[in-house]
Every structure is written in structure tokens, then in C-alpha cells.
Image: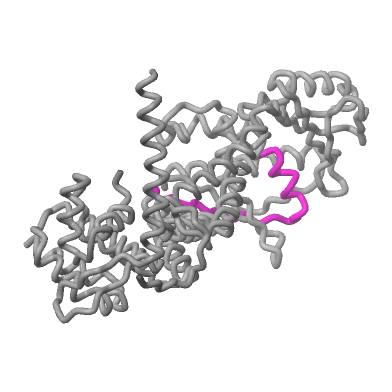
Amino acid sequence: MLEHLRRLIVHLYPRTWRDRYGEEFSALLDDAPARWRDLPDLTRGALAMQLQARSWKHVAALGGLIGLIAAATLMLTQPPQFASVAKIRTSDGKAIPFLSMHVLSRPVLAEILVRNRLYMDHVPIREPLEDLVERMRINIHIDQDPKNPSEFGVVFRYPDAQTAQSVVRMLIAEYIFENKRESMAANMPGSILEEVSAPDLSTHPLRSISTWTLLWGIALGALAALIIRQPIRRTFRLAAFALAGLIVVGAPLYLVKDRFLSTATIVARRAITVPRQSNVQIQELPMPAASPHVYRVTAIRTNRLEAQRALQGLLVALDPAIKEIVESPSVPALPISPNRIIPPLWGAAAALLYGILRTRRYIYSGTAIPNTPNANSN
Amino acid sequence: MNDPSLLVLSSLADGDKHGYAMMEDIESFANVRLGPGTLYGAITRLEQLGFVAPVNTTDRRRPYRLTLSGRRSLESQLEALHQIVKTGLRRLKHA
């Protein structure tokens, strides 16, 4: 059995290697007593020879393929996501952004979230409500067909089909309610005419196939294969390059203070501006011409409560001009900057690439020699 | 010390040897049992670098010999190791 396995693994060595060393290698296996620990040793040797026998392009392509398969497997093993979809027909497609602003506001989403107990069973640690609302917002899509702007779809993705359906029903109810409220206030005909289709319970489970994840899988697989191809000491040397890149880029980021973003959405009676020195940004949201002025106000501070207080102070100062506060100033849970993960990873990748280019002509002992073998003899 | 390449070069320093003879020799002087994959990985690399060369034979067990550049490489590596050992032992004595 063991002997059979040893002989089987020898077939994993490249054909060119077997043509050159196969006979004498077979003689060695005949002489040396078989041990179980030879199996991983032979497998590692076969992998190393396979990588050595191929050009770096082939090795990178092979690693990329393995990375792609690994990334796809990882994604497919994630829990499925059910997408519940409903369509609404309107008389005026331009009203959709205005209605969406109300329906997708924090208070409305927070209420739907709590009533449906969203994300309570799927997150290992209880997250702040603010973060859960953001998570929910990411999973809601308002799809407006450019060819038929009077119809729009409301989509919500969730690991449970019935919950996804329930959320979409509530979102549609909110759209209809907001539409009626605004129509009555503005004394104009309602824009939502009918609910085209109810949310479909039998929607397909979607797995989050992400192009970026696949690309990262390919890149990491290719890089890993190129590193494995190196002799062991060069691997350590390349790891040192990567570590240096990680530290050089990452360390300064820990000296930079966290910055928190607080946001609020208001409806104003007239056009408003804020003093530049208040260090608060204001942006008017695109709305139909007849609609009131809607603004998103943001403040960035190094303290989360200071960011919220800056907006609260501004809203007090603007009070006479404010008709409605759609979203009160939020308390940011997580900093928006600096990003301490991606830049150091890029630094490590760049340093690693530099290391590969710099050391590829040198053997592991550190002696500079040409790549071409020098068949000296005594 | 378990660098397979250095062990193979050291084994060939006192004469030509085939794979199994190298394996036994290395185990006797370094107390390290190289696996067949590791041993032939080192031989392949060393031959590519021109540090060892096969000896012509009709036997299935092909012996290898140390080349001139292999001998120089071994000497420089052993000198470096010797320097480390000497310094380490001296410092230990004075510690």
C-alpha cells in the first residue's frame, strides 16, 4: 500500500524531470525503506519540481486558476441570499427619489428592522442599530427602468425568503403612505398608481458572486504560486519584503487620528447655505422642480460625538429655514478614515513585487550568479 | 543545520555517491534523515547550478560528484559557519 502510494506520487513529477532522474530516483526508492513520512515529502518535491519546470507565466496562471476556484468555493459556501422583488407603477417617475428619501430614512428602516428582527440571528456580535440600518440599506435596491421610468422595482436581499418578502411588503406600504401624504400636502394627484406585482416568495437564492473577490482570488493565487516556486530562503526574504511594505505603509496610519462622519437629512423652506468656517458640508439632493429643497448635511470630526454635536448646532442655527428633519444627526459607530487595512496590504503587495524583481536573478545563498547553469567540472 | 543543499555538498566532499549512499552518509554525520523528495530536490537544484555533476555509469544508481564551483561554494559556506561557531563558542566561554 505504502510502496504503491510512493510510486504513484512519483508520477506527479514533471515528465522532463522523470526522463532525466526517473531511473535513479526509482533505484533510490527501491533501496530506502518506505516510511509514511515520505508521502508528504514526495508530494512537496513533486509540487516544487512542477513549479520549477514551468515558466513564471504558467506558474502564475496555474496559481490564479487555483485562487479563482478557491474564491468561487468560498463564495458558494456562504449562506444563500433570497431576493424579494416588487414592482410599482407611478404617474410621475421624477417623484421616486423624493419618496425614496423618506422611505429609506433611518427612522423608517430602523422600525422595519426591529419589527422583522433583521440580522439578529446572523451576526456573531450585536452591532449598533446604526450599523444594522446601514447594512439593511446596502441590501435594498431601487431599480428604475430607464426605458420605462414610470415603473420601479423594490428589491431586498436577505438569507431568509419570508423575511425578505415581509420587508419588501413594508417598504411598499411606506412608499404608498408617503406618496399619499405628500400628494395631499401638495394638493396634487398621487404618483403611485398601482402595485404591479406582489413580492415573489419563490425568488432564486442568490450567492454573493463578487467580481472583486474572484479577482483577489486570482491575484493572491498567482502571487502565492510564484512565492512557493522560490527556494525556501528566498521565500523568507520575500516575506521580509512584504512585512517591510506592510509596516512602512501601515505604521504611519496609526499616528493619524480617526475621523467620524455624522449625517443628517433636512427639508428646507428655501435654499440655504452654511458658513464655510463651520466646517460642515451641505449638499442639495436632486428632486423634482416643484419639490422643496432637500439637503444632506455632513460633518467630519475626530470625535464621534463632536461630529454629531456640530450638526445639531447647525440645525439649531438653521431652524427658521427648516421645514422637516428627515434624518436627525447620526452618531457614527465606525470611523470613515484612515483605512488601516487596504493601504498596508497594497504596500505589502508592492514591496513583494519589488522583492521578486530584485531577487529573481540571485540564488538563495545570496551569491549573484547567472540563471544559466554553469556546468563546471573538476 | 539541516540545509539539504549544504548537506549534499558536504556528503560529496569525500567522494562520489549515489542517492541512497548520500542519504545514509548524511544521517550518520548530521543525524538528519532526508526524504527522497527533499534529497532529489537538492540534487536537481545543485546540478542546475553546476555545483554537482552526474558520473557516467550503466548502473541504475547514478553517483554524483562535486564540481570545482561546488567545492568553492561549500568552502565559503563552511568558512562562514566556522566563523559563527568559533565566535559563539568564544563568547560562551567568556559569559
Left or right: where does residue A311 sit relative to residue B45? right
Residue drawn at point x = 84 percent, y = 43 percent:
A291
- Foreground of the two, A281 or A312: A281
Is A82 in the magenta? Answer: yes
Q: Is residue A105 above or below residue B26?
A: above
What is the basis of the colouring in this image?
Answer: one colour
Is A215 in the magenta? Answer: no
x and y, in percent, of residue A297 in the image: 79, 32
Quarter location, residue A10: bottom left
Tell which residue pokes out farthest to the bottom in this image.
Answer: B58
The C terminus of chain A sits in image quarter: bottom left
The N terminus of chain A sits in image quarter: bottom left
x and y, in percent, of residue A93 in the image: 74, 55
Q: Which span of residues is magenta-colored?
A: A78-103
Q: How many marks?
A: 0
Residue drawn at point x = 33 percent, y = 56 percent:
B5
Left or right: where does residue A143 sit relative to residue A93? left
- Foreground of the two, B46 or A75: B46
Q: Is residue A44 above or below residue A263?
A: below
x and y, in percent, of residue A105 in the image: 67, 35
Q: Is residue B61 above or below residue A86?
A: below
- Visible in this render: residue A202? no
Residue drawn at point x = 47 percent, y = 65 percent:
A60
Quarter location, residue B13: bottom left
Residue drawn at point x = 36 percent, y = 36 percent:
B85
Quarter location, residue A24: bottom left
- Foreground of the two, A99 or A306: A306
Left or right: where does residue A244 sit relative to residue A161? right
- Visible in this render: residue A100? yes
